[in-house]
Image (spheres, rainbow, N blue to C red):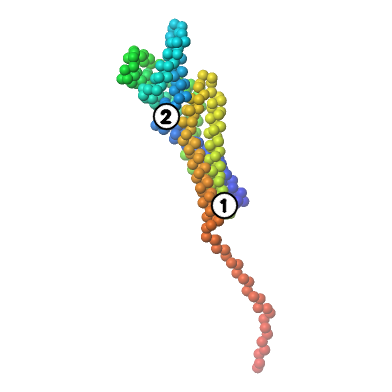
Amino acid sequence: MRSALSTLLIALACLLLAPCGTLAAWAAYGLADTGRYAAAMAPLADDPDVRNAVAASVGDGVMAEVSAPASGTVRQFVQDAARSFTRTEAFREGWDAANRTVHDAVLRALRDDRSGSRAVTVDLAPVTDRVKEQLADDNVPFARSIPVPHTAVTVLPAREVDRLRKGYHVLDVAAVWLPLAAVVFAVTGIAVAACRRRAVTATGIGTALGGALLALAVVAGRRLTLAELPGAVDGPAAGAVYDALTGTLRTASWLLVGLGLTVALASWLTGRYGPPRHRRTPARPAADPGPPRRTRTRF
């Protein structure tokens, strides 16, 4: 019973609670922090796939505003201008400002239960104004004449707000209790084991397996995410965004693998090359004195 209970507790701690707790902590303290989110997204301003996707989107938006039919030469000129813009410092500042603005708006909607089921919208006019000022400082022609419309851009539909808010609250609680439960289950499993050294070794191996399962889940999540994207979304750019956001999660999964293997190896080496355990020598039974000898008494 002790061995079975120890195995069950260690398996739950290492293969279920540890990976799920790491995932919840990453979502609650990584994705839900504006500073960490912006830091993860900032390098994408120099990613070729992201810049090409942004340039194509900007070019299509400009061409949609042209009332007269545009020739292929004009379209190519607009696309080249958009690609050139994505290589400027103004684009990097606008990228960072837009990510922070959108992230703040989404977080406020998820954390505020009083906001109801309204759609989450942001006004990107301040971002456009900053880009306009940067272009004007760089002496870009016609930069001063760029319009700065105040348009509400929907970043989260109303039908998704309630579902995501409930999920956010669950992750907020799970990020604290799942790692704590993993530690408690593992320690209890070691404490009740018949052989604690073997239980420590099993805990290390289980932690490494849990980290490997989490790494595989990240890879599988990437494939599923890219497979379900609508046709209008650029696949390579979305893959670059996914990789940037899950970089910390991949690092955490490999840390679990390394920590588990280190613990398992240290426990195995201690049992193999450590000082020998002192065993109690069973006491030898006393010799049978036999029947009592009769003695003669002389009177």
Using the image as rendered, state which of residue 84 and residue 196 is in the foreground: 84
In the image, is residue 114 above or below residue 274?
Answer: above
Residue 216 image position (x, y, % from top left)? 55, 36
- Mark 2 belongs to which amino acid? Pro
Residue 43: give its label.
2
Q: Residue at x 31, y 20 (%)?
A: 137
Determine which residue is flagged by label 1. 198
Q: Residue at x 34, y 17 (%)?
A: 140
Residue 235 image position (x, y, % from top left)? 52, 24
Judged from this view, the residue extending furthest toward the top is: 68
Q: Residue at x 67, y 81 (%)?
A: 292
Residue 138 image position (x, y, % from top left)? 32, 20
Using the image as rendered, state which of residue 297 and residue 81 is in the foreground: 81
Quarter the C terminus occupies = bottom right
In the image, is residue 74 above or below residue 266?
Answer: above
Residue 69 image position (x, y, % from top left)? 46, 6
What kind of element bears circle 1? helix
